[in-house]
Image: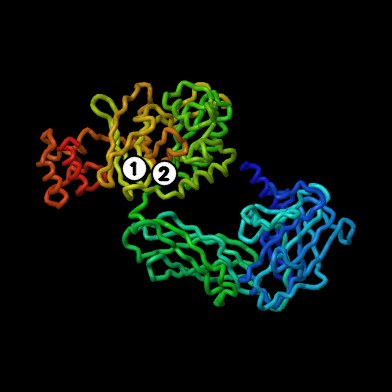
Amino acid sequence: MKKILTLLIAWFAMSSVCMAQNGSFTLGYCDGQLATVATGDLFSNEKHIWVQSAVYIPASQAKVLAGNRIEKIRAGLANKINVDSLRVWIRTSLDGEDLVTATMTKTSTPALNKGWNEFVLETPYEIPEDTEGFYIGMSYYQRGVARALSVILNPQPNALFVKFGDTDWVDRSATGALCLEAEVYGDNLPQHDLQLQAVKADRYLSLKKGELNVTATVRNMAVATINNFKAVCTIDGYDEPMVVDINHPIAYREVKNLTFVVKPSMITSVPDGPLNLYVTLTNLDGNDDENPSDNSGQVSFFVIDNVFVRNVLMENFTTERCPNCPPMATMVHRVLDQPEFSNVILWEHHSGYYEDVLTTQFDRDYMWFYNDGGSTYAPAMMYDRFGVTATTPVDFPETQAYLENMLTERLAEPALVDINIKAGYLEDGKLKVIVTGERTQETFTTLPPRMTVALVEDNINAVSQSGASGTFIHHNVGRAISSVWGEEILWNGNNYRYECTFDVDEAWNKENLGIIAFVSEYNPRNPVACGVANTRLLKADLFGDITEGLTGDVNGDGEVGIDDVNAVINIMLGKAESVAAADLNGDGQVGIDDVNGVINLMLGK
């Protein structure tokens, strides 16, 4: 379905006729685009009926055009088979009388045809000063089934009303926009009119950062190019407006997505629930907007204390028996070599298409994510385990652009939990891992967050990789795991600490080992409810000595007691020199959370 929509949109774009007429103003919603394939169910199987369709021009827009006249109407047909005649009209109500009309048949000059049909009105429609809005419509008579309605896939209010035979009029604007336009001429055409079509903003405002990125979709609804305007932004409950100067030329009928930054310094604490940001466009090259009714929009956002660096976990299902995996690996590393994707962490699962010598049991377990009745394939990807469809987080990225878009979308998501990793070898040769971090607020996931730690090995030479010529290298292959589905995090306030150890096989190259830790959700009944909140990779060259410290035994007497609590308090107050054993949560600081941690250890909690 996704491919079909993409193809149709490209087809529509190729069929577009989006140009301004000299000395005129184009009225309609399709922006000159023409759909040459009928859309969905917009047809009738009845014979010998009139099929009617229309767009509505509301009073707010119509009054801007008052004193001018409509001289031409262009009507698009996706097909002319079984269409005997085509008529355009203007009415003040859908079932009202025709104020003006014009007709074209198969034998008229010009004759109706598939595509655009232009009508020159013998009597132009003079738009009155007291207009309350009007409909511009087209009707065609079909002697048989005629899939002729031309509708582009750009839903917007007032853009499509339809009526088949004796049925009632139905508003189908949620389906798309009718390919129907009128040309307005006169001496009073609007010069300054911007429309704010949509507003988007960051989901979270971090008090620590103090900035909110806002994107406004703006269209020039008047004939003069607008070079400069202001965006006035206000927030619920705060009187102080924020005014942003925007210097981006927008030509007649042009649509631009403009991103700017607001700094709501008046917000100093985290409120309950979301806040609304209101955006209004004003001062168009120093002029008032001639139609201020469509200049405003709003978007909601949440306030949090902080956001953290976002890393994306990209999991790759691959095996040496997969002939299509080497080309995919080439594309993946071409993407990961780009600086903007340096925060993407790759993890290989050797499953999905048979198995190989690197397959582990957790590789097999993770095939559950496919959620396709046991049907699996490789190569395949997951991006933070977020659903690419309603049923699975697994998909096949057909192009590099698609892969980049998926990763860019995930990288743009703010991270509400932080991850820090320390790892080192113990005397018995085991690898100990300590993961610490904090969250921005008590609840940032729907389900209880879980911690998963994976031991991976990089740069493994393939034994016999299908589809590859010469040497082929596997990257970040899973060797061991702390828990397949993660272990629920135990919070100390907004901080956490997690420990695990791994047995290290002598056959593994220690210099190429790494630790991937990630916080995620887990719903055993729903593969798309297991999203990864954040992740981190620690490579072997950053492993260190962790045989001492981080135990709560601050005074080193082999026990954790009240003297250790006092020692942490003295360090926190600057009365004693800091030692590693006092920093229980591993955040590099000694504070009240570490005091609580020592007390919990002392009490056996």
Numbered disc 1: secondary structure: loop
Quarter of image, res 547:
top left
Task: Identify the residue at image location x=15%, y=52%.
Answer: 573
Any part of residue 168 in sight: yes
Percent across and percent down for residue 301 are 42, 57
Q: Amino acid at mark 2?
A: Asn
Which residue does the numbered mark 1 point to in the structure image? Answer: 419
Q: Position of residue 49 (x, y in %)?
A: 79, 53
Amino acid type at mark 1:
Ile
Label for residue 102?
Answer: none
Is residue 513 visible to us here?
no
**The C terminus: image quadrant:** top left
- Specify few, some or many for label 1: CA neighbours under 10 Å numbering under 14, 14-19, or 20 or more: many
> 183 and 432: which one is in front?
183
Q: Is 132 above or below relative to 384?
A: below
Residue 512 is situated, as x and y percent measured from the top left of the image, at: 39, 31
Left or right of 2? Residue 445 is left
Residue in the foreground of this view, choosing between 341 and 377: 377
- The residue at which mark 2 appears reads as 311
Q: Are marks 1 and 2 in contact (CB under 8 Å)?
A: yes
